[in-house]
Each structure stands twice: as C-alpha cells, then as structure tokens.
Image (cartoon, helix red, strand yellow):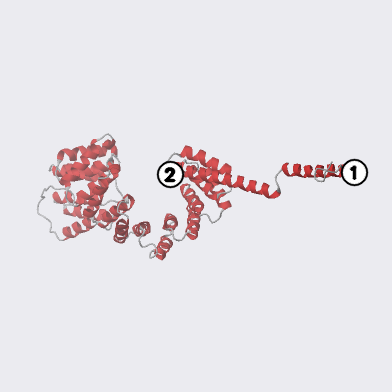
Amino acid sequence: MNPLTNRPMTAARRSLALAAAALACAGALAGCSGHGKYTREHIAQAKEKMTMLKSGTEYQMAQQQFLAGDLDKAMKTIDRSVALNPNVARSHVLRGRILLERGRLEQAREALLTAEGLDDQNVEAQYYLGIIHERVNEPGEALARYSRAAELDPANPQYLVAAAEMHLVQGHLDEAERMLTEKKSQFRYNAAVRQALGQIAMLRGDASTAARHFADALTLASDDAGIMEDLIRAQMACGDFAEAEYHIQRLLEREENKNRRDLMHLRARCLMAVNRPVEARTLLLELTGHREGSRDLRAWIDLGNVAASLKDRANLRTASQRVLAIAPDRHEGWMLRALLGRIENNPEQALAAADQAAARTTTDAAPFLLRALILEDLGRLDEARESLVEGLHRDPNNRAAQTLLAALDNTPKPSGAVVGHGAAGE
C-alpha cells in the first residue's frame, strides 16, 4: 500500500519506487565517500599554512638562540625550520650566519648562496658572503659583495663602510675616500663613516686630519673603544701626547681593559713625552715586573730610557742587561749601556758601547747622535761631526742630529778635552 494514498501498489510501481530509492542511496553514499575538489584544495592550503607557521616559529626561536650565543641549539632549530620550508631565503641566511660563527666557512658560503638563489635582492646574503671572502683574504670578491649590499640598501652605512674598507685593503685610497665623501652629508651623524675617513687620512700620513675625523666620530659614539684607540694613535702621531694620555686613561679605567699591556705601553710613552718620567717609570716597572714582562723587549727599552733621564743607575743597569739578553743583535741594549757609562762618568766605556750600537743599525740615527755626544764630552769634535754626518746618512730628517751638527759647526775647537755627563738628547 502506498502510505501517501492508502492504495495498494502494483508490482510495476513497486519496482520503480525501489529503483528511485536505490539511486538516492547511491548518491548519498557517493557524497560521503570523499571531499570535493574545493574542499581538498582548502585542506591542502591549510596544511601548507600550518607548515609555514611552524617553520616561521622555528626560525624565530633559532634567531633568539643565535643572538643569545647558543649556536648548537640555534643550528638544530634552523635546520628544522629549513626542513619544514626550504624556500625561505632568510632561513638560509641565518643558517649561514650560524655556520660562519662556528668557523665552518665553506658550509656557510653554501647556505648563503642558496639564499641568494632564492632571493637575489637579499641584502644580508650579500653582506655575509662579503665577510666570508674577507676572512679568506679575497678582498676583490669581498668588495663586490659589499658594494652589491650597499646598492640594495643605500640607506645603511654599514655596507658602504665595509666596501670602503676593502678599497683600503687594496690600496685604493682615492676610491675609498670618494665613496665616503659622496655619502658624508647623508650619513653626517654616523661615526663609522667619519672613522673610515680618519683611517684614510692616517694611511696618507695626515695625522692632524685623521685626529679631527676620529674626534668627530668619538663625539658621535663616545663609548666606542675602537674609535678612541684610533684617536689615541693619531694624537700621538701629531705629538699631542697629553690628550692621548687622557684617552688612554679612559680606556684603562674600563674593566675589560684593566690588564691590556698595549695600552699601558702607549701610556708610558705619553708620560715620557709630557715629562712625567717618574709616573712612566712606575708603570714600566709594573709592566716588566710580571712573568709576562720578563721578555717584553719594548717595556725594558722604555724603562732603560726613563731610568737614564732620571739618572736611575740601578734600573738603567738592569734594563740594559735584560735588553742585551733578549736581543743581543739589536742596538738598543748597547745604547742603554752607553748611557749608563756616560752617567757613571766613564766615557771610554760609553764610547765602546755606542760603537757597538752604531754597528747594529742601518736606519736609526740615535746611536750616532749618542756617539757624537760622547765624543764631544771627550773633546773630539771632528769625530763627533763625522758621527753626526754618518747618522744623517741613515736618517736625513733627524732634527736632533741636524741641530747638534749645526752647533758643532759653530763651535771653535777646544784646547783640551772636557768630560761631561748627561743623557742622550740633552
């Protein structure tokens, strides 16, 4: 019976009803058996977005680990990020930076080249490839990479300065200066640009211009130790030892520089130059008093010179012995022995030591100047003149030798020898 009409169904009608029901059921089953094309694409996109999200999260974690100095964890994390999504340039750049920090330059280069292949506009890939070439002493390739980075990001002075430094390494001073000068107004508040200009001036032997650039740079970055050290050396080259000593003191007051022997050496030289020999002697005794200082040739030579200026026979004797023991073939130890002989009023011993010093140098006029002073003490003026002339052959610009020679030329020959004593340079 048909439930809608309450009439019995014929066999034909029953067959048609069964067929329609079967078709409807088949259609319903087909709809439940799988997703439609739109649904499948939506699911694939969702999975891809989730993978990218996970990759980005791993990248951020790796970056934090890298900045914290945990290179091992950073390496594992960035590898997971790359495995999830190998088509992101910044991930390969970070991987290259981690490898670079670990000293694995070839693998770092491969990672950065991969980043470049994915994105040839990636500035960091160019910059860090430049660093790798610089480390393996390939300045031409490094210059090309740094220059490319500067083209891609002309607002960042870091890349410009790096390119200029590569020009300096190759001796292209004019090109380096041109690059920096063109951008000087744009980066007028950037310390690195002014520091680089100062380095160019120093390489040209223009210490006064260099000192001005370094002073400007230090004004812009007052805590930068590298700039301060550049300024110190420029000031010393200019003869501005008082200012240099002040800046050295500032550096030595920092905890990380407390035991830096190179800065202590520079300060001792400045103290000697500004006529503070007692302070210089105290500092040099500290430098030579430790185990590390037992073979510090420069410190012993400076101590000997300071002791000579103070007529401190004990320290002068010790210094001369140490210098001769460390470097018997150099002239400085014999110079110190000659100074000791002069202070002890023993000109013959002093002259013999000065002869030894003169025989051991080809470029320094100082031994000949000291020898001339000793000969003058002995009244042997002609020989003193000859010694000065010989010294000026080695160093034609030695002002002390020029001054003494002019004085001797205007001095009449004495009737007898007069023995005096005093330190060289008096």
Between 269 and 392, the residue placed more toward the observer is: 269
Q: Is residue 158 left or right of residue 56?
A: left
Q: Which residue is mark 2?
A: 67
Question: Residue 8, position in %: x, y?
Answer: 86, 42
Question: Residue 200, position in %: x, y?
Answer: 37, 59
Q: Quadrant of residue 307?
A: top left
Tell me, yes or no, whether the two marked residues, 1 and 2, touch with CB atoms within 8 Å: no
Residue positioned most to the front: 6
Mark 1 vs mark 2, foreground winner is 1
**Within 10 Å of the Cα at label 1, are there few (<14), some (14-19), or many (20+) other Cα atoms?**
few
Between 273 and 258, the residue placed more toward the observer is: 258
| Number of the label disc, if any, that sits on residue 228 | none
Q: Amino acid at mark 2?
A: Leu
Image quadrant where one finds the N terminus: top right
Q: Residue at x 16, y 57 (%)?
A: 408
- Secondary structure state at the residue bearing disc 2: helix
Q: Residue at x 45, y 41 (%)?
A: 65
Question: Residue 180, position in %: x, y?
Answer: 40, 62
Between 323 and 209, the residue placed more toward the observer is: 209
Q: Amino acid at mark 1?
A: Ala
- Up/down of 173 relative to 69, above or below: below
- Secondary structure state at the residue bearing disc 1: helix
Q: Earlier in the sequence, mark 1 or mark 2?
A: 1
Question: Residue 394, position in %: x, y?
Answer: 29, 54
Specify whether residue 340 is in view.
yes
Q: Is residue 141 left or right of residue 234?
A: right
| Number of the label disc, if any, that sits on residue 12 | 1
